[in-house]
């Protein structure tokens, strides 16, 4: 199945196109400015690179957050408009899951951290290796509270490390230092192809969202775990 993946929840946006386990095309874009104007041209170009028309895709997967309020809203709104126009399914994907998916083959816990401001982070815990699985909901909480949920060995990822990496090292005990790792920069962003592949996992199980009711997942209060977000 041919899936278009849209990711605009972080400053480095991405559009990906996959056909099953094959990568057809991907484009990365800086969406810190004029992101609404950049997204549709990026989608058009990605489809051209994949030699597909918009009518030939089977579904659109979109990152629903948490992340930038404006970015998530634009991505979800664009995906909804496309799916309504071409009458194809829409699938929401957690931004945190899309980041963790970069490390899905790593045999350890994966803890994703994004800066939520107000001295809080957006975070979630996954396990990679032989069995890729989610181990926590998407959370919004202080970094010290998130760290009580991890069990080293653990690899941390996400753009929140720009602010919190030193604090993570300080908060975790010294005898755990050999079991704490930080992902390299290319593995800290939620790629459009990851959104597409995670959306495909839901789609093959006939687990989709409603084009009219799907909304961004901001999780400023409490916890949230978007349906089927892996």
Image: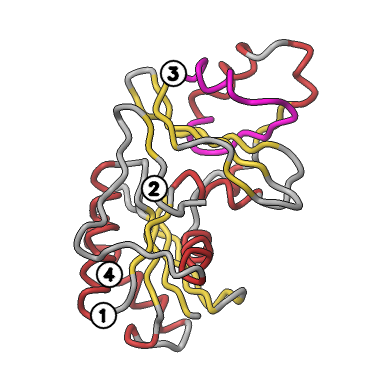
Instruction: Kindly indicate whether the residue at mark 1 contacts the one at mark 4 (C-beta within 8 angstroms).
Output: no
Judge by depth and name the residue closer to the eye, 141 or 134.
134
Q: Earlier in the sequence, mark 2 or mark 1?
A: 1
Q: Is residue 31 above or below residue 170?
A: below
Q: Nearer the viewer, mark 4 or mark 1?
A: 1
Q: How many marks?
A: 4
Distance Cα–Cα, label 4 vs label 1: 18 Å
Q: Label 2 belongs to which residue?
A: 226
Q: Nearer the viewer, mark 1 or mark 3?
A: 1
Distance Cα–Cα, label 2 vs label 1: 22 Å
Distance Cα–Cα, label 2 vs label 3: 21 Å
User: Measured from the top left, where is residue 49 in percent x and y?
Assistant: 46, 82
User: Measured from the top left, where is residue 207 in percent x and y?
Assistant: 42, 64
Disc 3: CA contacts within 10 A as few (<14), some (14-19) or many (>=20): some
User: Measured from the top left, where is residue 147 in percent x and y?
Assistant: 57, 20
Q: Earlier in the sequence, mark 3 or mark 4?
A: 4
Q: Which mark is residue 142?
A: 3
**Residue at image x 66%, y 42%?**
127
Say which element carries label 2.
loop
Distance Cα–Cα, label 4 vs label 2: 25 Å
Q: Which mark is residue 170?
A: none
| Residue 113 part of the magenta-drawn span | no
Say which element carries label 1.
loop
Q: Label 1 belongs to which residue?
A: 87
Q: Which mark is residue 40?
A: 4
Q: Is residue 56 above or below residue 19?
A: below
User: Measured from the top left, where is residue 109 in percent x and y?
Assistant: 68, 36
Q: Which residues are magenta?
A: 143-161
Q: Earlier in the sequence, mark 4 or mark 2?
A: 4
């Amino acid at each position: 199945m041919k899936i278009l993946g849209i990711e605009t929840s972080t400053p480095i946006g991405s559009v990906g196109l996959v056909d099953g386990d094959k990568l057809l095309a991907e484009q990365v874009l800086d969406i810190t400015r004029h992101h609404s104007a950049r997204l549709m041209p990026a989608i058009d170009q990605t489809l051209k690179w994949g030699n597909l028309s918009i009518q030939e895709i089977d579904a659109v997967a979109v990152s629903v957050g948490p992340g930038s309020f404006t970015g998530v809203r634009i991505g979800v709104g664009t995906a909804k408009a496309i799916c309504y126009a071409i009458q194809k399914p829409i699938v929401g994907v957690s931004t945190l899951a899309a980041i963790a998916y970069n490390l899905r083959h790593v045999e350890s816990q994966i803890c994703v951290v994004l800066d939520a401001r107000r001295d809080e982070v957006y975070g979630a815990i996954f396990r990679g290796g032989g069995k890729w699985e989610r181990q926590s909901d998407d959370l919004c909480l202080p970094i010290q509270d998130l760290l009580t949920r991890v069990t080293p060995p653990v690899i941390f990822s996400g753009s929140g490390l720009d602010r919190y990496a030193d604090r993570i090292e300080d908060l975790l005990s010294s005898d755990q230092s050999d079991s704490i790792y930080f992902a390299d920069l290319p593995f800290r962003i939620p790629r459009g192809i990851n959104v597409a592949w995670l959306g495909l996992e839901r789609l093959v199980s006939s687990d989709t969202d409603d084009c009219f009711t799907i909304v961004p997942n901001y999780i400023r209060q409490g916890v949230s775990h978007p349906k089927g977000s892996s």
